[in-house]
Image (cartoon, rainbow, N blue to C red):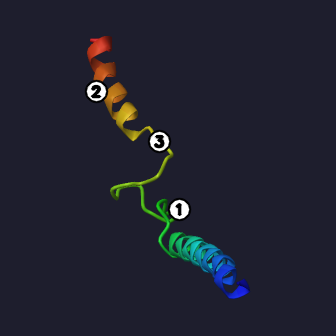
Amino acid sequence: MENRSSGGWKFFALLFGALLAGIAALYVYKQHNPDYDPWEQPWENSSSPIDLGLEKEEKEEKDAPAAEA
């Protein structure tokens, strides 16, 4: 009877091992392919969460001469 019940822990051990291996593989993948590239140039299509404010400065420069005139 012990042979019949011994397969249960093997199943859960293999399931846990596969889950752990999947998490480790995802971690390694994210390390090699980051969503955010800190060395990306600002004129490229940026994935940066930092707003450089370039569009706002251009709009202010266009609005400023109209407001002064």
- Residue of label 2: 62
Expressed as whole percent of the image width and height from the top left, the position of residue 25 reads 55, 77
- Badge 3: few (under 14), some or many (20 or more) residues near its Cα, within 10 Å? few
| Disc 2/disc 1 C-alpha distance (Å) | 31 Å
- Residue of label 1: 38
Please tell me which residue lies in front, 56 or 32.
Answer: 32
Q: What is the secondary structure assignment of the residue under circle 3?
A: loop
Q: Earlier in the sequence, mark 1 or mark 3?
A: 1
- In the displayed structure, does residue 2 sit left or right of residue 57? right
- In the displayed structure, does residue 56 sit left or right of residue 28? left
> Which of the 4 image quarters holds residue 3?
bottom right
Is the C-beta separation of discs 2 and 1 under 8 Å? no
Expressed as whole percent of the image width and height from the top left, the position of residue 13 reads 66, 78
Kind of residue at disc 2: Lys
Depth check, mark 2 against mark 3: the one in front is 3
Please tell me which residue lies in front, 40 or 54.
Answer: 40
Residue at 50 percent across and 66 percent down: it is: 34
Kind of residue at disc 3: Asp
Q: Quadrant of the C terminus?
A: top left
Kind of residue at disc 1: Pro
